[in-house]
Amino acid sequence: MADASFARALSLLFVLLLLAVAALGKTVKRDVKALNEIKSSLGWRVVYSWVGDDPCGHGDLPPWSGVTCSQQGDYRVVTELEVYAVSIVGPFPTAVTNLLDLRKLDLHNNKLTGPIPPQIGRLKHLRILNLRWNKLQDVLPPEIGELKKLTHLYLSFNNFKGEIPVELANLPELRYLYLHENRFTGRIPPELGTLKNLRHLDVGNNHLTGTLRDLIGNGIGFPSLRNLYLNNNELTGVLPDQIANLTNLEILHLSNNKMIGSISPKLVHIPRLIYLYLDNNNFIGRIPEGLYKHPFLKELYIEGNHFRPGTRSKGTHKVLELPDADILG
Protein backbone atom coordinates (compact mmCIF):
# COMPACT_ATOMS: atom_id res chain seq x y z
CA MET A 1 0.00 0.00 0.00
CA ALA A 2 2.81 2.36 0.96
CA ASP A 3 4.64 1.46 -2.23
CA ALA A 4 1.53 2.34 -4.29
CA SER A 5 1.18 5.73 -2.53
CA PHE A 6 4.85 6.45 -3.10
CA ALA A 7 4.50 5.58 -6.77
CA ARG A 8 1.48 7.86 -7.16
CA ALA A 9 3.34 10.69 -5.43
CA LEU A 10 6.36 10.12 -7.66
CA SER A 11 4.15 10.09 -10.74
CA LEU A 12 2.46 13.34 -9.66
CA LEU A 13 5.84 14.96 -9.05
CA PHE A 14 6.99 13.91 -12.50
CA VAL A 15 3.87 15.45 -14.10
CA LEU A 16 4.42 18.68 -12.17
CA LEU A 17 8.03 18.80 -13.35
CA LEU A 18 6.92 18.33 -16.94
CA LEU A 19 4.40 21.14 -16.55
CA ALA A 20 7.08 23.39 -15.07
CA VAL A 21 9.45 22.65 -17.94
CA ALA A 22 6.65 23.30 -20.42
CA ALA A 23 5.85 26.60 -18.73
CA LEU A 24 9.49 27.66 -18.87
CA GLY A 25 9.41 26.97 -22.59
CA LYS A 26 6.44 29.21 -23.34
CA THR A 27 6.74 32.63 -24.90
CA VAL A 28 4.29 35.20 -23.58
CA LYS A 29 1.27 35.31 -25.91
CA ARG A 30 1.46 39.08 -26.36
CA ASP A 31 4.93 38.81 -27.92
CA VAL A 32 4.02 35.82 -30.07
CA LYS A 33 1.05 37.71 -31.48
CA ALA A 34 3.07 40.89 -32.09
CA LEU A 35 5.93 39.12 -33.89
CA ASN A 36 3.57 37.13 -36.06
CA GLU A 37 1.80 40.35 -37.05
CA ILE A 38 5.18 41.80 -37.98
CA LYS A 39 6.08 38.61 -39.83
CA SER A 40 2.96 38.85 -41.96
CA SER A 41 3.81 42.42 -42.96
CA LEU A 42 7.48 41.94 -43.88
CA GLY A 43 9.08 40.87 -47.14
CA TRP A 44 10.35 37.42 -47.96
CA ARG A 45 13.99 38.22 -47.15
CA VAL A 46 13.09 38.28 -43.48
CA VAL A 47 10.23 35.81 -43.34
CA TYR A 48 12.03 32.90 -45.00
CA SER A 49 14.20 32.48 -41.89
CA TRP A 50 11.31 32.90 -39.45
CA VAL A 51 10.13 29.31 -39.16
CA GLY A 52 7.36 28.21 -36.83
CA ASP A 53 4.90 30.27 -34.82
CA ASP A 54 7.05 30.95 -31.75
CA PRO A 55 9.64 33.74 -32.30
CA CYS A 56 11.67 32.47 -29.34
CA GLY A 57 11.87 28.98 -30.80
CA HIS A 58 10.09 25.80 -29.79
CA GLY A 59 11.22 22.20 -29.70
CA ASP A 60 13.79 21.71 -32.45
CA LEU A 61 13.04 25.10 -34.00
CA PRO A 62 15.55 27.85 -33.17
CA PRO A 63 14.57 31.45 -32.32
CA TRP A 64 13.79 33.63 -35.29
CA SER A 65 16.76 35.40 -36.84
CA GLY A 66 17.25 38.80 -35.20
CA VAL A 67 15.01 37.97 -32.24
CA THR A 68 16.51 37.67 -28.75
CA CYS A 69 14.44 36.35 -25.87
CA SER A 70 14.96 36.23 -22.12
CA GLN A 71 13.35 34.29 -19.31
CA GLN A 72 10.98 36.31 -17.14
CA GLY A 73 9.36 34.30 -14.44
CA ASP A 74 7.66 31.30 -16.01
CA TYR A 75 7.68 32.74 -19.52
CA ARG A 76 10.03 33.98 -22.20
CA VAL A 77 9.79 37.54 -23.50
CA VAL A 78 11.31 39.25 -26.54
CA THR A 79 14.03 41.70 -25.44
CA GLU A 80 15.79 42.50 -28.74
CA LEU A 81 14.62 42.83 -32.34
CA GLU A 82 17.32 43.42 -34.95
CA VAL A 83 16.09 43.33 -38.53
CA TYR A 84 18.31 45.64 -40.54
CA ALA A 85 19.59 45.97 -44.10
CA VAL A 86 17.00 43.57 -45.51
CA SER A 87 14.98 46.02 -47.63
CA ILE A 88 11.87 46.14 -45.46
CA VAL A 89 9.37 48.29 -47.35
CA GLY A 90 6.34 50.01 -45.89
CA PRO A 91 5.25 51.87 -42.78
CA PHE A 92 6.81 51.49 -39.37
CA PRO A 93 5.39 48.22 -37.95
CA THR A 94 3.20 49.47 -35.12
CA ALA A 95 2.94 45.94 -33.68
CA VAL A 96 6.52 46.43 -32.46
CA THR A 97 5.13 48.70 -29.75
CA ASN A 98 3.39 45.67 -28.20
CA LEU A 99 6.77 44.12 -27.34
CA LEU A 100 6.72 45.73 -23.92
CA ASP A 101 9.96 44.13 -22.66
CA LEU A 102 12.00 45.25 -25.66
CA ARG A 103 15.42 46.69 -24.78
CA LYS A 104 16.86 47.05 -28.27
CA LEU A 105 15.07 47.84 -31.52
CA ASP A 106 17.25 48.01 -34.62
CA LEU A 107 15.53 48.43 -37.99
CA HIS A 108 18.19 50.58 -39.64
CA ASN A 109 19.07 50.59 -43.34
CA ASN A 110 15.67 49.56 -44.66
CA LYS A 111 12.95 51.39 -46.59
CA LEU A 112 10.47 52.16 -43.84
CA THR A 113 8.16 55.08 -44.56
CA GLY A 114 5.64 57.22 -42.71
CA PRO A 115 5.86 58.49 -39.14
CA ILE A 116 7.06 56.88 -35.94
CA PRO A 117 3.77 56.08 -34.16
CA PRO A 118 3.11 57.72 -30.80
CA GLN A 119 2.70 54.24 -29.31
CA ILE A 120 6.52 54.08 -29.28
CA GLY A 121 6.24 55.56 -25.80
CA ARG A 122 4.97 52.19 -24.52
CA LEU A 123 8.45 50.64 -24.77
CA LYS A 124 9.51 51.65 -21.25
CA HIS A 125 12.49 49.28 -21.15
CA LEU A 126 13.99 50.36 -24.48
CA ARG A 127 17.67 51.34 -24.34
CA ILE A 128 18.68 51.39 -27.99
CA LEU A 129 16.47 52.68 -30.83
CA ASN A 130 18.13 52.58 -34.23
CA LEU A 131 16.04 53.67 -37.21
CA ARG A 132 18.70 55.47 -39.27
CA TRP A 133 18.93 55.08 -43.04
CA ASN A 134 15.21 54.71 -43.73
CA LYS A 135 12.60 56.95 -45.37
CA LEU A 136 10.69 57.82 -42.23
CA GLN A 137 8.99 61.21 -42.20
CA ASP A 138 6.70 63.65 -40.41
CA VAL A 139 7.43 65.12 -36.98
CA LEU A 140 8.97 63.14 -34.13
CA PRO A 141 6.32 62.10 -31.62
CA PRO A 142 6.85 63.69 -28.21
CA GLU A 143 6.17 60.26 -26.73
CA ILE A 144 9.82 59.37 -27.42
CA GLY A 145 10.46 61.40 -24.28
CA GLU A 146 8.72 58.65 -22.29
CA LEU A 147 11.53 56.15 -23.01
CA LYS A 148 13.31 56.91 -19.73
CA LYS A 149 15.91 54.14 -20.08
CA LEU A 150 17.01 55.11 -23.61
CA THR A 151 20.79 55.50 -23.98
CA HIS A 152 21.19 55.47 -27.79
CA LEU A 153 18.86 57.19 -30.26
CA TYR A 154 19.70 56.98 -33.98
CA LEU A 155 17.29 58.72 -36.36
CA SER A 156 19.76 60.03 -38.95
CA PHE A 157 19.27 59.83 -42.73
CA ASN A 158 15.49 60.03 -42.80
CA ASN A 159 12.99 62.73 -43.75
CA PHE A 160 11.82 63.92 -40.36
CA LYS A 161 10.60 67.51 -40.27
CA GLY A 162 9.38 70.09 -37.79
CA GLU A 163 11.13 71.03 -34.59
CA ILE A 164 13.29 68.75 -32.48
CA PRO A 165 10.93 67.88 -29.62
CA VAL A 166 11.91 69.35 -26.28
CA GLU A 167 10.69 66.10 -24.71
CA LEU A 168 14.04 64.52 -25.66
CA ALA A 169 15.38 66.36 -22.62
CA ASN A 170 13.30 63.94 -20.51
CA LEU A 171 15.68 61.06 -21.28
CA PRO A 172 18.07 61.05 -18.31
CA GLU A 173 20.19 58.11 -19.53
CA LEU A 174 20.67 59.35 -23.11
CA ARG A 175 24.31 59.22 -24.25
CA TYR A 176 24.15 59.36 -28.06
CA LEU A 177 21.68 61.46 -30.04
CA TYR A 178 21.92 61.26 -33.84
CA LEU A 179 19.48 63.44 -35.80
CA HIS A 180 21.62 64.49 -38.76
CA GLU A 181 20.52 64.41 -42.41
CA ASN A 182 16.85 65.17 -41.87
CA ARG A 183 14.65 68.24 -42.44
CA PHE A 184 14.38 69.60 -38.92
CA THR A 185 13.65 73.32 -38.55
CA GLY A 186 13.55 75.79 -35.69
CA ARG A 187 15.96 76.01 -32.79
CA ILE A 188 17.80 73.22 -31.03
CA PRO A 189 16.17 72.86 -27.59
CA PRO A 190 18.60 74.26 -25.01
CA GLU A 191 16.94 71.89 -22.52
CA LEU A 192 19.12 69.15 -24.02
CA GLY A 193 21.90 70.67 -21.94
CA THR A 194 20.29 69.16 -18.83
CA LEU A 195 21.13 65.66 -20.07
CA LYS A 196 23.99 64.80 -17.74
CA ASN A 197 25.07 61.69 -19.65
CA LEU A 198 24.90 63.05 -23.21
CA ARG A 199 28.25 62.48 -24.94
CA HIS A 200 27.42 62.91 -28.61
CA LEU A 201 24.96 65.35 -30.16
CA ASP A 202 24.71 65.39 -33.96
CA VAL A 203 22.07 67.61 -35.59
CA GLY A 204 24.10 68.39 -38.72
CA ASN A 205 22.61 68.71 -42.20
CA ASN A 206 19.19 70.05 -41.25
CA HIS A 207 17.57 73.50 -41.50
CA LEU A 208 18.08 74.58 -37.90
CA THR A 209 18.26 78.21 -36.85
CA GLY A 210 19.21 80.13 -33.72
CA THR A 211 22.58 80.77 -32.10
CA LEU A 212 25.15 78.79 -30.22
CA ARG A 213 24.55 81.12 -27.29
CA ASP A 214 20.89 80.03 -27.30
CA LEU A 215 21.95 76.42 -27.09
CA ILE A 216 24.59 76.51 -24.38
CA GLY A 217 23.24 79.45 -22.38
CA ASN A 218 25.60 80.33 -19.56
CA GLY A 219 27.68 77.26 -20.28
CA ILE A 220 26.75 75.09 -17.29
CA GLY A 221 24.88 72.49 -19.37
CA PHE A 222 26.13 69.50 -21.35
CA PRO A 223 28.54 68.34 -18.62
CA SER A 224 29.54 65.12 -20.43
CA LEU A 225 29.41 66.31 -24.04
CA ARG A 226 32.39 65.20 -26.14
CA ASN A 227 31.17 65.62 -29.73
CA LEU A 228 28.99 68.50 -30.95
CA TYR A 229 27.99 68.46 -34.63
CA LEU A 230 26.02 71.55 -35.72
CA ASN A 231 27.34 71.71 -39.28
CA ASN A 232 25.31 72.46 -42.42
CA ASN A 233 22.49 74.38 -40.81
CA GLU A 234 21.45 78.05 -40.68
CA LEU A 235 22.90 79.00 -37.31
CA THR A 236 23.77 82.65 -36.77
CA GLY A 237 25.45 84.72 -34.06
CA VAL A 238 28.93 84.52 -32.58
CA LEU A 239 31.03 81.77 -31.09
CA PRO A 240 30.52 82.72 -27.42
CA ASP A 241 33.04 82.59 -24.60
CA GLN A 242 30.78 80.13 -22.76
CA ILE A 243 31.79 77.41 -25.21
CA ALA A 244 34.93 76.98 -23.10
CA ASN A 245 32.79 75.69 -20.23
CA LEU A 246 32.18 72.50 -22.22
CA THR A 247 35.38 71.11 -20.77
CA ASN A 248 34.94 67.56 -22.10
CA LEU A 249 34.49 68.67 -25.71
CA GLU A 250 36.68 66.87 -28.26
CA ILE A 251 34.89 67.68 -31.53
CA LEU A 252 33.24 71.01 -32.38
CA HIS A 253 31.83 71.00 -35.92
CA LEU A 254 30.33 74.36 -37.01
CA SER A 255 31.01 74.21 -40.75
CA ASN A 256 28.58 75.68 -43.29
CA ASN A 257 26.47 77.96 -41.12
CA LYS A 258 26.00 81.75 -41.00
CA MET A 259 27.96 82.52 -37.87
CA ILE A 260 29.77 85.82 -37.44
CA GLY A 261 32.30 87.66 -35.30
CA SER A 262 35.78 86.89 -34.08
CA ILE A 263 36.90 83.61 -32.55
CA SER A 264 36.82 83.54 -28.76
CA PRO A 265 40.31 83.15 -27.28
CA LYS A 266 38.72 81.02 -24.58
CA LEU A 267 38.56 78.12 -27.04
CA VAL A 268 42.16 77.53 -26.05
CA HIS A 269 40.95 76.50 -22.60
CA ILE A 270 38.97 73.48 -23.80
CA PRO A 271 41.54 70.94 -22.61
CA ARG A 272 40.64 67.92 -24.77
CA LEU A 273 39.69 69.63 -28.04
CA ILE A 274 40.90 67.55 -31.00
CA TYR A 275 38.83 68.67 -34.02
CA LEU A 276 37.61 72.24 -34.63
CA TYR A 277 35.78 72.98 -37.88
CA LEU A 278 34.83 76.60 -38.53
CA ASP A 279 34.83 76.64 -42.33
CA ASN A 280 32.27 78.40 -44.52
CA ASN A 281 30.83 80.90 -42.06
CA ASN A 282 31.32 84.66 -41.73
CA PHE A 283 33.96 84.71 -39.02
CA ILE A 284 36.47 87.60 -38.95
CA GLY A 285 39.72 88.61 -37.24
CA ARG A 286 42.43 86.18 -36.26
CA ILE A 287 42.63 82.69 -34.88
CA PRO A 288 43.91 82.72 -31.28
CA GLU A 289 47.56 81.76 -31.41
CA GLY A 290 47.10 79.35 -28.54
CA LEU A 291 45.06 77.05 -30.75
CA TYR A 292 48.11 76.36 -32.89
CA LYS A 293 49.97 75.32 -29.74
CA HIS A 294 47.12 73.33 -28.24
CA PRO A 295 48.51 69.94 -27.12
CA PHE A 296 45.61 67.87 -28.51
CA LEU A 297 44.21 69.88 -31.43
CA LYS A 298 44.85 67.93 -34.64
CA GLU A 299 42.45 69.59 -37.07
CA LEU A 300 41.57 73.28 -37.38
CA TYR A 301 39.73 74.11 -40.59
CA ILE A 302 38.90 77.75 -41.33
CA GLU A 303 38.41 78.12 -45.10
CA GLY A 304 35.51 80.19 -46.45
CA ASN A 305 35.54 82.92 -43.79
CA HIS A 306 36.84 86.50 -43.61
CA PHE A 307 39.87 86.02 -41.42
CA ARG A 308 42.83 88.34 -41.76
CA PRO A 309 45.44 87.43 -44.39
CA GLY A 310 47.92 84.85 -43.20
CA THR A 311 45.45 83.00 -40.99
CA ARG A 312 46.00 79.32 -41.58
CA SER A 313 44.39 75.96 -41.03
CA LYS A 314 45.95 73.17 -39.03
CA GLY A 315 46.06 69.52 -40.08
CA THR A 316 44.24 67.96 -43.02
CA HIS A 317 40.51 68.39 -43.28
CA LYS A 318 38.58 65.13 -43.44
CA VAL A 319 35.06 63.91 -42.90
CA LEU A 320 34.60 62.70 -39.36
CA GLU A 321 32.49 59.62 -38.75
CA LEU A 322 32.62 57.54 -35.61
CA PRO A 323 32.76 53.77 -36.18
CA ASP A 324 29.87 51.74 -34.82
CA ALA A 325 32.16 50.20 -32.22
CA ASP A 326 32.63 53.64 -30.66
CA ILE A 327 28.99 54.61 -31.07
CA LEU A 328 27.68 51.53 -29.28
CA GLY A 329 30.29 51.60 -26.54
Image (cartoon, rainbow, N blue to C red):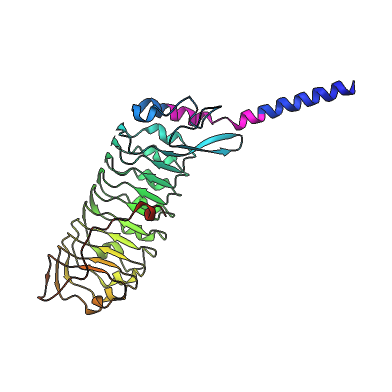
Residue sitting at the far front: 60
Image location of residue 70, percent across then percent down: 54, 39
The answer to which of 8 and 77 lies nearer the viewer is 8
Q: Is residue 76 above or below residue 220?
A: above
The N terminus is located in which quarter?
A: top right
Question: Is residue 28 magenta-colored?
Answer: yes
Q: Quadrant of residue 257?
A: bottom left
In the figure, is residue 210 to the left or right of 144?
left
Q: Is residue 325 above or below residue 305?
A: above
Magenta part, dominant SS:
helix
Q: Quadrant of residue 172?
A: bottom left
Residue sitting at x 34%, y 48%:
154
Give x and y (percent) for residue 25.
Answer: 59, 31
On whether residue 250 falls in the magenta region, the answer is no
* In the rendered image, the vertical position of residue 207 relative to residue 52, given as above or below: below
Q: Is residue 223 left or right of residue 180?
A: right
99 to the left or right of 290: right
Q: What span is colored magenta in the figure?
A: 20-36
Q: Position of residue 141 (x, y in %)?
A: 33, 42
- Name the residue at 57% across, 38% down: 71
Q: Is residue 159 left or right of residue 93?
A: left
